[in-house]
Amino acid sequence: MKRKPLLMSLVAALLLVLTSAGTSFSSGLGAPASAARSAAAASAGCGKAPALTSGNHTIQSGGQNRSYILRVPAGYDNNHPYRLIFGFHWRGGTANDVDSGGTDGYNWSYYGLRRLADNANNSTIFVAPQGNGNGWANPGGQDLAFVDAMVNQIEAGLCVDTTQLFAGGFSYGGGMSYALACSRATVFRAVAVYSGANLSGCNGGTQPIAYMGLHGLRDNVLPISLGRELRDTFVRNNGCTRQNPPEPANGSLTHIITTYSGCRSGYPVVWAAFDGAGHDPGPIDGSTGDGWRTWTSAAVWQFFTQFGSDTTPPTPQPSGNQKIVGQQSGRCVDINASTTTNGTQAQLWDCNGGSNQRWTHSTGKQLMVYGNKCLGVGQAAGNGTPAAIWDCNGQADQQWNVNPDGTITAAQSGLCLDAVGQGSGNGTKIQLWSCTGGANQHWRLEN
């Protein structure tokens, strides 16, 4: 993937000195763009011929010519209000790096979210803004004003669901996403901050917004303590129960995702700590390297897409007695020979309608079979952990999220339900694995 330049460490250190000295950036702009919204989710651009197309755009903001790259979904429908996601680049990166996906190409475009959106029926408009000097210093709130201008232009020119605006970015781009969380909490629904710090200011910072922070234990550019500080701003604002969420051991080459308890309804805080890749948005479990096969893409996509609106149908969830059918294999998730023995690993098998292939997704996020056995993975789950049945106990290792992109992820780890070795034949075992976007990790639910 396209990575930050070596000078990033020096620049980040300088910026941290400024912010720790109490430097703040006040926009002085009055009400932010889109702060006053009607009850309807549809923007002014709905029902009209699109005024914007995919590609490079320029806009006047604060007396400057600013630029951004726009990605309009294939088959754009001007009567459908779309989700809008901003992807902010890192120090020394560019809008093109975010849009193109760098050396990983399409698979890493917009931190891997574009691929997942395409898999979910082209559900999202993407924007990659270009920072001045390839950064987001936000002097005098100029970058906040730039975002306001883009939001206004895009909502006027395209059909946008105004309740479904999201922002995410890595490093300096994470700092900019945090600045938006602080000052535009009534405009953006949620943000994801990859290995960020308070680099672009925090004007306001008292209102709740759904917040996800991702940070590496070995980050030697922006230490994880800085990411924890950003997270704790919204633990407080969102009324969450304060805690010290678990983080993986140094050297474990794994990650742990924690959803805070007690948060105000609709304003979750999620913390994803990882070991291995250092200062990076794309860590891969079991490795000190990175790449588009990271688990972070699916985790952030899941976080963003949990928020519905009046114009967006709720995410379909499996109800009682449904089959879980593999996209690649066409076979069902099955318990061999209808056994009820604890520890029996799930497998693929020809769909036959048997009770050992009928699953219920409970309100507690359990995947239940036979009415009293739950699919579980154990408390220390990692890549290759068997997905097996156990007596239902309500604990986190037996909780699953069924996602709009067709993946099923363990609520505790964020890893995907996976057919071993991309197998598709009868008897192929089911396990946990880092989300790759492969067909062996996509499932459909059938009655």
Image (cartoon, helix red, strand yellow):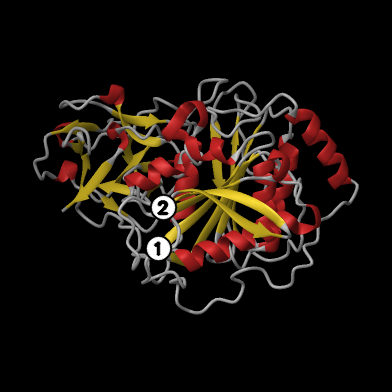
Q: Judge from the rendering whether residue 297 lies leftward or rightward of residue 342; answer left or right.
A: right
Label 2 SS: loop
Q: How many marks?
A: 2
Q: The residue under label 2 is which amino acid type?
A: Val
**Residue 209 seen from this side:** no
Residue 365 in the image, given as x and y percentages of width and height: 38, 52
For residue 72, the mark is 2
Residue at image mark 1: 50
Mark 1, other Cα within 10 Å: few <14 / some 14–19 / many ≥20: some
| Residue 198 x %, y % | 76, 47
Residue toward you, 241 or 198: 198
Q: Secondary structure at mark 1?
A: loop
Return the residue found at the far bottom: 38
Task: Write down the quadrant of residue 326 in the picture.
Answer: top left
Regarding residue 113, the answer to whether it shows in the image is: yes
Where residue 349 sits: x, y (%)? Answer: 15, 32
Q: Position of residue 431 (x, y in %)?
A: 34, 30
Query: In the image, is 46 to the left or to the right of 11?
Result: left
